[in-house]
Image (tube, rainbow, N blue to C red):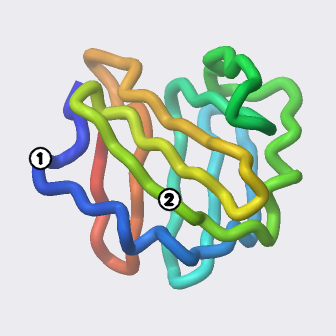
Amino acid sequence: MNGLPKNFDGSFLVGCALEMVCFNATQMYLHFSKGVTITVEGTFSYRKTASQAAPAIKVPVKESDLMQLLEQSVSKVTGDQSGALTLSFSNGQIFKCFDSSKHYESYQIKIGDKVIVI
C-alpha cells in the first residue's frame, strides 16, 4: 500500500469529463479530458446515488454500468489516508478507487507525463 501522496491535491480532475472506459483482463482505464487517465488494477466501487450501497469490485470486471458516467464531469475529488480516491460526478454518481494491495499497484493516475502510482 503506497497510499496517496501526503500533499495530494485532486483539483486537477475537477471539471474533467470522462471520455472513455476501457477494460482488459487485468486493468480498467478511465480516460478523462485534459489528458488525465486513471488505471485501476485493484478494487473500486461505483454508486449511482449517494445513498446506494457500493460493493467493492475487483478487476477483472465481468460487467459494469460505468458507461453511465461517460461525458459526465468530475465535480469533487477527495483522497483519504487509506489511499482511497473518490470522484463525485456532475450527475451525482460516485466512483472510488481503493489502495487494496500490500504488494502490487492498485491504481495509477496519469496527468500528461506525470504518473502517481498507488
Q: Quadrant of residue 113?
A: bottom left
Image quadrant for the N terminus? top left
For label 1, the SS is loop
Q: CA distance from mark 2 to mark 1?
A: 18 Å
Labels 2 & 1 near each other (Cβ < 8 A): no
| Camera-side residue of 109 and 12 | 12
Q: Quick one: label 2 or label 1, which is nearer the N terminus?
A: 1
Q: Which numbered marker is on residue 46?
A: none
Report which quarter residue 109 is drawn in.
bottom left
Q: In the image, what residue type sits under mark 2?
A: Lys
In the rendered image, which residue does mark 2 sit on?
Answer: 76
Residue 117 located left or right of residue 76: left
Identify which residue, 3 or 24, lies in the foreground.
Answer: 3
> Mark 2 or 1, which is nearer the eye?
2
Quarter of the image with the C terminus is: top left
Residue at 29 percent of width and 47 percent of height: 117
Q: Which residue is depicted at the point 69% across and 67% down? A: 18
